[in-house]
Image: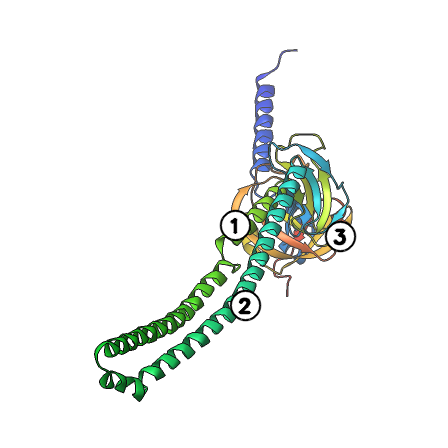
Amino acid sequence: MPIGRSSVHWLGTSLAVVTASAWILTTSGPPARAQSASKTGGATSRSEAHALGRVEPATGLIVVGSRPGARILEIRVGPGDAVKAGQLLAVLEGREEAKAQIAMAEARKAQVEHQRATRREKLALERTQLDALHSARLTTATQVAQILKKKLTDPGNLMLGATLTGRDKLEGESKYIELQVQSLKAELDKTSLDIEQSELVKQRALEDKQLDPSNPEFQLVDRQIELAKAGLAQTEVVAPRAGTVLDVLAHAGEVGSGPLLRMGDLSAMVVVAEVYQTDVTRLRVGDRATVAILDKAIAGKVTRIGSIVGRNQMMNIDPRSLQDLRVVNVTIALDEAEPAARLVNLEAEVAITPGGGG
């Protein structure tokens, strides 16, 4: 049957209405779920900001990595294991060699310490002997100098040259001169011992400095041990903080490419909600919120409001809602960790009451 002009006009009008309705639906601001909630609820529901969010630990989801290019010899934890900060999670190749390097460096340090202790004991023995000998020499030299000085100042020796004549006088003067020389020599010996004593103090200070732990020779062995321990640390993967292992991303025997496992502290959970950009200006830190997780409503409060507007990552399955939104991340601390702690990255529906923090 042929289609009349009126039918064609009616069909065109219907298509225009349908197209206009579709355009209105796809350009209507916040998601349809938030709009319907504001139409059906009372004053409180009309002021709520609705959004989708993801569940994660309050301290964040931690990705623990291994040294790229190193073979993984052993993974000592599995999903669900609770770990402490610093606990060994995995062992990489080269660990035994690194342990041997540490043992060698520690043996070298023990050798140096033994040599230093032996040298110190030897110096103590030498100093005791030297002090005793030096004291005896100084006492003897002092006595000899005093005796000779007394002879030189003896009036009888001074008058001897005046009473003698001829050859006897010459011999007497020679003996007197020889006595003077001996006296001078004795004084010189005493002075030399005094100087030796003062220099001995400086020499011993230098010897003590050489045996002091601040000597670079002794510090070198400590740095060698630190270097060996750093090498060992490169073969171990330890937990950066306490938490629970959520997923293991590698296997023993593989060559590490970076990520090894994911973990987090599940004792405190948050929801990072993607709030529509026009709603976020009404929110404040401390506002109360309700989060729907596994058909259970959990209370919480806003602890952080982001300042960067970006594209939404959470997609609503409602075909009537917008899929390309400009949102701001808002963090909501949950009053109780369960059941959120069982499903990290779970999608949750969030309703925030502006000014609800009191």
Mark 2: give few (<14), some (14-19) or many (20+) Cα within 10 Å.
few
Earlier sequence position, callout 1 versus callout 3: 1
Could you tell me which quadrant the C terminus lies in? bottom right
Q: Position of residue 138 (x, y in %)?
A: 44, 74
Q: Amino acid at mark 2?
A: Thr
Q: Position of residue 39 (x, y in %)?
A: 66, 49
Residue visible at 44% across and 68% down in the picture: 201
Mark 2 and mark 1: Cα distance apart in space: 31 Å
Q: Which residue is mark 2?
A: 128
Closer to the camera, 174 or 86?
Answer: 174
Q: 70 left or right of 343?
A: left
Earlier sequence position, callout 2 versus callout 3: 2
| Rendered view: 234 above or below 354 | above
Q: Which residue is mark 3?
A: 297
Could you tell me which quadrant the N terminus lies in? top right
Mark 3: give few (<14), some (14-19) or many (20+) Cα within 10 Å.
few
Closer to the camera, 27 or 344?
Answer: 344
Q: Amino acid at mark 3?
A: Ala
Q: Amino acid at mark 1?
A: Leu
Earlier sequence position, callout 2 versus callout 1: 2
